Amino acid sequence: MKFFETLGQKPWLTPDTGGTAAAIPLETDQLAAARIALRFVMTIVSVLFFLFIITFLSRSQYPDFQALAGAPWQPFTDTSRLWINTGFLALSSAAMQFGLISAQRNALRGAITGISAAVFFTLLFLLAQLYLWQYLQALGFYVGTNPANSYFYLLTAVHGLHLLGGLVVLANVVFRVWYDERPDTLAGPLQLCTTYWHFLLVVWLVLFALLSSKPETINTLAALCGF
């Protein structure tokens, strides 16, 4: 994808008249193109999840749909597990912000600490999501048992895949910066990755609110959408 390729390029280097590489400001055409690419990716992801949510609300009006919260036996009436997972993702987003601030101040040790913590908490979130899947299946909430179950697995899987994609991009950014021995250029690409992490946190909060909603809330949202 062009987004991956753009982040992997070295816009801070340009050949001079002697055939050597000279540093140029980080605000370059390549970095600007990466920003545009990121906005495009976030727009596409937003539209994707918006369509999923609309179909979720539409499907909720059929008799076989049973919300995952409301009754005592429903798994998300108690949202403690979802809050734990949310905490992991929020910590990863905060760590990314800390790493970005450190990189902008040329504090390399702080940037490394922030990025490492962000990766750690992101992986914890993904593992916690897998554990939540196992927990639901142990309770008998399988993919095909109920349309609400199917949407839960689908939405969390798609969200997790986007997080994994973010980890790949982040690893590529860090590798390229260290490979070129130019840690002072980390702030620009890291700002894009941090924005993406914050964006996925907001997406998860929306999914959390939707999936843990009681039937009355879901029906109200569906009515507002004309279903």
Image (spheres, rainbow, N blue to C red):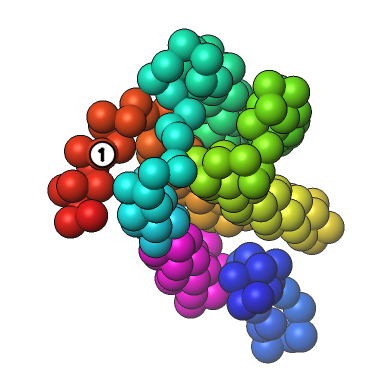
Give the x, y percent position of residue 75: 55, 20
Give the x, y percent position of residue 180: 79, 60
Q: Nearer the viewer, residue 58 or 94?
A: 58
Q: Nearer the viewer, residue 127 or 168?
A: 127
Q: Nearer the viewer, residue 142 or 63?
A: 63
Residue 224 lies, with reference to residue 3, above or below; the image says: above
Q: Is residue 155 left or right of residue 66?
A: right
The answer to whether any part of residue 95 appears in the image is no
The answer to whether any part of residue 164 appears in the image is yes
Tell me the kind of residue under disc 1. Answer: Asn
Residue 164 lies, with reference to residue 78, above or below; the image says: below
Which residue shows up at 76% across the image and 85% down it?
Answer: 19
Give the x, y percent position of residue 73: 52, 15
- The residue under label 1 is 219
Q: Residues within 10 Å of mark 1 (few under 14, many from 20)?
A: some
Which residue shows up at 62% across the image and 77% down it?
Answer: 2
Of all residues, the one furthest to the front in this rendering is: 63
| Residue 211 is inside the magenta segment | no
Of all residues, the one furthest to the right in this rendering is: 179
Name the quarter where the N terminus is drawn.
Answer: bottom right
Give the x, y percent position of residue 194: 52, 44
Q: Secondary structure at mark 1?
A: helix
Residue 109 lies, with reference to residue 75, above or below; the image says: below
What are the residue bounds of the magenta stretch? 22-48
Which residue shows up at 59% across the image and 70% down it?
Answer: 3
| Residue 35 is inside the magenta segment | yes
Which residue shows up at 66% across the image and 43% down it?
Answer: 143
Dominant secondary structure (helix, strand or loop) of the stretch shown in magenta? helix
